[in-house]
Amino acid sequence: MEKENIFCVDNEGFRFICARFSGPTFSGLDFNKFTLSWKHSSNEVRRLLAHAASASPYDTSSTKSLNQTRTWTNQLLVSLYPMSTMILENCAQLEVEKARLTDNAYSIDELRNLDAPKVTSLEIVALKKAQVVCKSRKCVRYEVVGGKVEVIHKVCHKECNSKPNAGLERCLIFRQTNPGPGICELCLCPMKKHKRVDFEQKIVTRVTQSQQISMMPFTEMRKRLMHKRERLASEYSKELNYILFALATFSLFLDENQISKQTNPVKHQLQKLLDAEERHLSRVKNGDPKKVTQLRHLFQMYCENWEKLVDQNGKKVTIEELAIVRNKLFSMAHTGAKIAEIFEINVDTDHQESEAAVTRCEPRFYE
Ligand SMILES: [Zn+2]
Ligand SMILES: [Zn+2]
Ligand SMILES: [Zn+2]
């Protein structure tokens, strides 16, 4: 959008003509004002017609696929943020285990359990005091539990004292000095995205004994466990690098096609997530800085990837390139299937939310 292709038309001049021929008289001052307004509008219309006549035809199908690409790119981004933090968390856990293996700090039973298959399940635990959770897309987190992706709601107010039958307006989290009525202090989502629940979602992990490893001599077992951790850590960090490359590529694409409100939208989004976590940390007593540290790390890694990409990239990112990046993401050994699954969940929620308001004319692009 530039000055040359913006056309402003006043309605005053038109209204004046209609009014004048219906009877009322106008003073000289008003008359001059309306004349100016009419002249301005008429010049603008002339300019618009001249502009339209001189413009060359444009193939709208490329805009359409650009819009579709923007839609799925944004949906994919939603699944990439939680997956990157999950990888960082797994890597940190692997580092802890490697250090303990090096220090010989595990007992024989612990060693046996270290790689034993673990069964996780999502349990719903009844609470004595209700809590307020946020179900907005920005606040939920995704966890793979027992091979299935589960949606975990963000807890915004633990042990909420407001009466169960009273509306959420009574909950403190919406009442303190917040930016407006009905905004959650903690997550900044509107009240209607929240719900009072009297249960808690809990991920429970149980270890089952592995036969194969339990027969091995102690040192051999340690060596194998160590080796596996080293391999896993390197595979995870490769996947994380690819995710960050993908994030930067998507961001660059959105930039180059001027289809996002900010420049470098992913950086902006990461900054927002980081700010929200920092705000959260500053408000709770003895909060765990882990998430803030992780996000800072991601932010840093992202910026490095972005700079590298911008330096190299003389030509524009194409829609075809984006599709290749997406398919590569989906086929990654550890996180690919989860990224694809979260992506599908988001596409589904989007579909449900917009169904009433939007008539869909096109088959879905990603199918
Ligand atoms: Zn409350
Ligand atoms: Zn909230
Ligand atoms: Zn929220």
Image: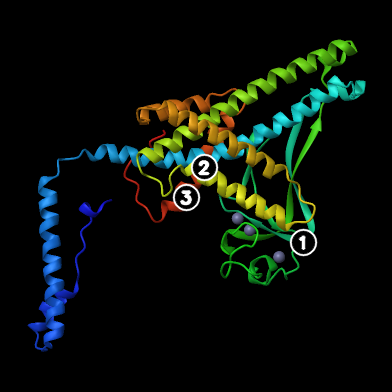
Q: Quadrant of residue 73?
A: top left
Residue that numbered label 1 is attached to: 159
- Residue at left offset 30%, top offset 40%: 64
Coloured how?
rainbow
Q: Mark 2 or mark 3: which is in front?
A: 2
Q: Mark 2 or mark 1: which is in front?
A: 2
Q: Quadrant of residue 197?
A: bottom right
Three-letter amino acid code at the position of disc 3: Gln
Three-letter amino acid code at the position of disc 1: Glu
Count of number-bearing discs: 3
Q: Mark 1 or mark 3: which is in front?
A: 1
Three-letter amino acid code at the position of disc 2: Lys
Whether pointer 2 and pointer 1 mark residues with C-beta atoms closer than 8 Å, the reply is no
Gap between marks 2 and 1 measured at Cα: 35 Å
Image coordinates for residue 121, horizontal then vertical, percent: 73, 38
Image coordinates for residue 133, horizontal then vertical, percent: 66, 56
Report whether the residue tagged 3 is closer than 8 Å to ligand 3. no
Please tell me whether residue 236 is drawn above or below residue 248 in the rendered image.
above
Nearest the eye: 177 or 134: 177
The C terminus is located in which quarter? top left
Please tell me whether mark 2 sits on a helix, a strand or a loop.
helix
Please give the label number shown on residue 352.
3
Residue that numbered label 2 is attached to: 267
Image coordinates for residue 236, horizontal then vertical, percent: 64, 25
